[in-house]
Image: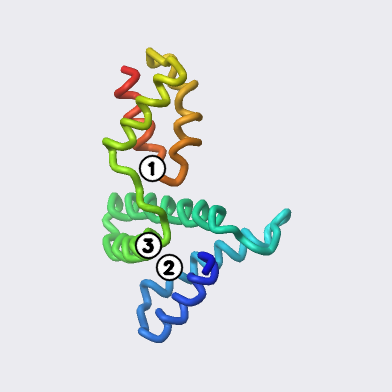
Amino acid sequence: MSLQQQINADIITAMKSKDESSLRALRALKSALLLAATAEGGKGEISDDEAIKIFQKSAKQRKESIEVFEKNGRLDLATAEKEELAVIEKYLPKQMDEAAIAEALKNIIAELKATTSADFGKVMPVAMKTLAGKADGKIISAILKQLLG
């Protein structure tokens, strides 16, 4: 079952169980998938890899919204975003922990023979490509800065 089909099935389940927060999140995901499928140059069908990228973007938007809402004292809106984020994260691959990210970055640094912080621009694109979908870019960047000094 593709992720797109799974979202559709989960929407029906959420409707039957009257789970409003899950339903909001699932409908948002379905909408994002439909927009991508019908966008100019779209193939009409979204692969699971493309769907995961869309879900990651959606999760990132939720995280940013939570941060803004909490900073502005809108805890009611932040709570709603957190509920949606929890639903979205169920469809994302498990994220690597910081130790695993650091280990992967050490291997990339050794491969590219990077030694100083001046090499950051050379290492970061390779790291982002290698760890795509497995780790957040902000975490990768922070750990890489530590490793390169």
Tag shown at residue 90 = 3
Sequence-wise, the earlier of marks 3 and 2 is 2
Quadrant for the C terminus in the image = top left
Give the amino acid at mark 3. Lys
Front residue of 56/73: it is 56
Give the amino acid at mark 1. Ala
Sequence-wise, the earlier of marks 3 and 1 is 3
The secondary structure type at the circle numbered 2 is: helix
Residue 136 horizontal/vertical position (percent)? 39, 42
Give the amino acid at mark 2. Ala
Residue 70 horizontal/vertical position (percent)? 28, 53
Which corner quadrant of the image does residue 120 belong to?
top left
Mark 1 or mark 2, whichever is nearer to me: 1
Q: Distance between the residues labelled 3 and 2?
A: 11 Å
How many residues crowd mark 2 within 10 Å: few (<14), some (14–19), many (20+)? many
Which corner quadrant of the image does residue 139 belong to?
top left
Q: Distance between the residues labelled 1 and 2?
A: 22 Å
For mark 1, what is the residue? 135
Residue at (45%, 70%) from the top-left corner? Answer: 26
Sequence-wise, the earlier of marks 1 and 2 is 2
The secondary structure type at the circle numbered 1 is: loop
Mark 3 or mark 2, whichever is nearer to me: 3
For mark 2, what is the residue? 25
